Amino acid sequence: MTKAVCRKGRRQVLAAGLGALLTWTGLVLWAAAEQPDSPPSPQADPSRACLMCHGENAPLPAAGIVHSSHAVLFGESGQGCTACHGSSREHLGLAEDGTRPPPDHSFGPDDPSAGINATCSTCHAGQVAPHWQGSVHEFEELACTDCHNAHDAAGDPALDPARQAGVCFECHQRERAEFMRPSRHPVASGGFASDAGLLSCSDCHDAHGSATVAELNRMTLNETCYECHAQLRGPFLWEHAPVREDCSTCHLPHGAIHDALLRQRPPQLCQQCHLAQYHPSTVRSGTGLPPLGADPNLLGQSCMNCHTAVHGSNHPSSPGFTR
Ligand code: HEC
Ligand code: HEC
Ligand code: HEC
Ligand code: HEC
Ligand code: HEC
Ligand code: HEC
Ligand code: HEC
Ligand code: HEC
Ligand code: HEC
Ligand code: HEC
């Protein structure tokens, strides 16, 4: 806050007639109004002034923050509430028309996201760097507070693997539906007790932006998968080209209606690419199914009845991925 604004604030506060406020609040305001040009000192304890009106039973309670990860701001040398909301001196009193001016930063719905992000970044720029600027979420004008809750005494939901997906699903409804499909990565989504918090979105994505497609947190899509499916990293003696290239040629990352997160059911999956070559050259039809027939390309594991090592093989005599 500039000095000029502070002086204006003092005039307004005095004009509002503090004498009329015979409460403790009034006394604190008086003290505040007496030395408006000095920065808030620990002795002035601005947080206590704020909590007089925003204590646990107040209409707009804010005491939870004292127990949150931001509790450190309320230590001896911390700036307390003013670290985020600004010194908000005008807010401490009433304006001439009897209304209460808002705090310097309200973080309410009318607050532009750029301003919110600048405030949070005064302390956190290092943690959201280097990809936040220009990321999809920054471009879409999200505010830090769309995902983070600065006041939650139970901790920040975005940092809690059990609650994080719920934060993302507020906006990403389509992904919520994908994670409800029969085959899915077990992300804690609230809907499935059996999926209790094994994975969270941030195991694969960096919500603060990244250099990869879809804000993935590794250098490539495949690198992201190898993080947990390391046995498929290879290199293999016999590589299957599409596996090397991109796991998502065959798999959906979130959820699928086919087993093993597959985009399509084999043999159609394989025949997208292998129709013209040698033995799989027939398009498979219902005649291969009982009682009309028993085509090994359709029953059981389909093509994988024989091509068991579809991700690649280290067996010297298995260029066809049969073992
Ligand atoms: C004298 C009582 C009082 C004090 C002291 C006080 N507030 Fe408030 N505050 C209120 C009231 C009343 C409202 C609701 C105003 C409204 O609805 O227009 C409010 C609203 C707010 C809001 C929500 C604003 C919005 O637009 O959504 C924030 C944030 C806030 N106060 C922060 C603070 C901070 C930070 C301090 C300390 C620097 C503080 N308050 C000190 C009475 C107070
Ligand atoms: C780390 C930054 C930060 C600090 C420190 C902070 N706040 Fe907030 N405050 C926010 C944000 C962000 C919001 C918007 C709600 C949200 O997303 O958490 C908010 C919202 C509020 C609201 C509106 C709540 C509502 O229900 O609409 C009040 C009142 C408030 N703060 C008061 C305070 C008081 C009093 C303190 C000190 C005890 C304080 N804040 C400290 C960031 C902070
Ligand atoms: C005055 C400096 C300051 C400001 C402004 C500030 N924070 Fe913080 N924040 C901190 C400190 C200090 C911590 C505790 C750091 C730690 O524990 O590693 C923290 C912790 C956090 C954490 C939890 C980190 C963790 O590892 O648990 C999140 C998330 C966070 N802040 C988000 C925000 C958001 C969003 C805003 C803006 C509304 C904000 N902060 C404003 C200083 C600040
Ligand atoms: C789209 C949602 C989203 C937005 C917007 C967002 N964050 Fe985060 N943030 C997250 C998630 C998710 C994590 C947890 C990352 C993890 O667990 O690896 C996180 C982690 C953090 C952490 C603690 C972890 C660390 O890196 O040390 C801080 C601090 C933080 N965010 C600050 C911010 C600030 C400041 C902004 C605004 C410039 C912001 N975030 C915007 C989702 C978001
Ligand atoms: C196992 C890793 C993984 C997890 C966990 C994961 N994702 Fe993804 N997500 C991906 C990959 C890989 C892509 C890119 C797909 C592509 O480009 O074909 C993606 C793409 C996306 C996209 C972009 C979709 C599009 O069409 O552009 C969104 C949005 C998204 N994920 C949100 C989420 C949310 C929200 C969560 C948590 C509920 C989540 N993801 C969990 C791997 C993951
Ligand atoms: C306030 C709304 C909002 C929240 C909350 C939110 N996002 Fe987004 N996100 C968007 C918008 C808008 C886009 C761009 C349009 C789209 O792709 O859907 C986007 C895009 C994405 C993309 C695609 C990026 C690309 O390159 O195509 C990913 C991945 C993503 N979000 C992940 C997350 C994750 C993970 C979380 C939770 C930590 C999250 N989002 C929370 C609004 C949100
Ligand atoms: C953070 C760890 C993690 C990452 C990263 C990850 N996965 Fe997974 N994946 C898992 C877990 C856990 C399971 C479930 C294993 C189980 O059910 O036994 C799984 C299962 C699978 C399955 C088998 C599903 C089934 O129904 O049998 C496939 C296919 C799969 N992942 C593909 C991928 C792909 C492709 C990527 C990269 C986009 C990826 N995974 C990234 C952890 C991860
Ligand atoms: C050419 C298509 C294709 C590509 C590309 C592919 N997969 Fe698969 N994947 C399959 C098929 C088919 C299955 C089911 C295997 C079965 O039923 O025996 C499978 C199964 C899986 C499984 C679960 C069973 C197992 O073998 O552990 C995981 C995990 C998996 N794939 C991960 C990956 C990863 C990671 C990548 C990228 C490195 C990848 N896949 C690329 C076709 C593919
Ligand atoms: C996205 C296209 C694509 C998909 C889908 C695909 N493949 Fe392949 N496959 C290839 C390519 C490209 C080669 C390398 C061909 C070459 O070297 O001539 C290959 C090679 C092979 C080979 C070895 C061929 C040889 O010449 O030795 C076998 C066996 C094979 N694939 C089986 C499968 C099976 C089984 C599936 C289904 C799970 C499948 N493929 C899905 C593209 C694909
Ligand atoms: C009954 C076992 C069996 C089934 C089922 C099967 N294959 Fe094969 N396939 C083989 C054998 C054996 C080879 C020769 C392997 C070698 O050279 O290592 C082969 C070779 C291939 C080749 C390499 C080209 C060639 O002829 O050398 C491709 C591509 C292929 N199969 C794709 C498929 C696809 C796609 C399916 C499912 C539609 C399928 N196969 C089902 C046994 C089978």
Image: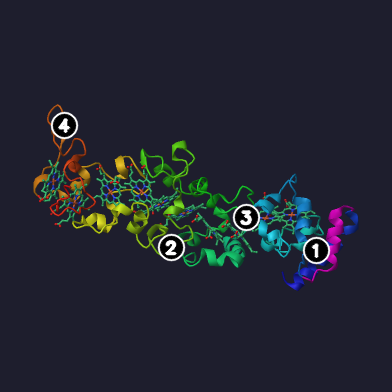
* x, y percent for residue 72: 66, 59
Looking at the rendered image, the disc whose residue lies closer to the viewer, 2 or 1, is 1
Amino acid carrying label 3: it is Ser
Classify 240 as above or below 37: above
| Gap between marks 2 and 4 measured at Cα | 47 Å
Q: In front here: 11 or 162?
A: 162
Q: Which mark is residue 133?
A: none
Residue at the spot of label 1? 44
Q: Give the residue displayed 34% in from the left and 59% down from the top.
A: 223
User: For the residue labelled by badge 2, is the local secondary structure a helix, a strand or a loop?
Assistant: loop
**Image disc number at residue 289:** 4
Taking the image as shown, residue 9 lies to the left or right of residue 157, namely right
Within the magenta stretch, is there residue 28?
A: yes
Which comes sooner in the sequence, label 3 or label 2?
3
Q: Is mark 4 within 8 Å of ligand 10?
A: no
Q: Nearer the viewer, mark 1 or mark 4?
A: 1
Residue where numbered disc 2 is placed: 210
- Is 30 magenta? The answer is yes
Name the residue type under label 1.
Ala
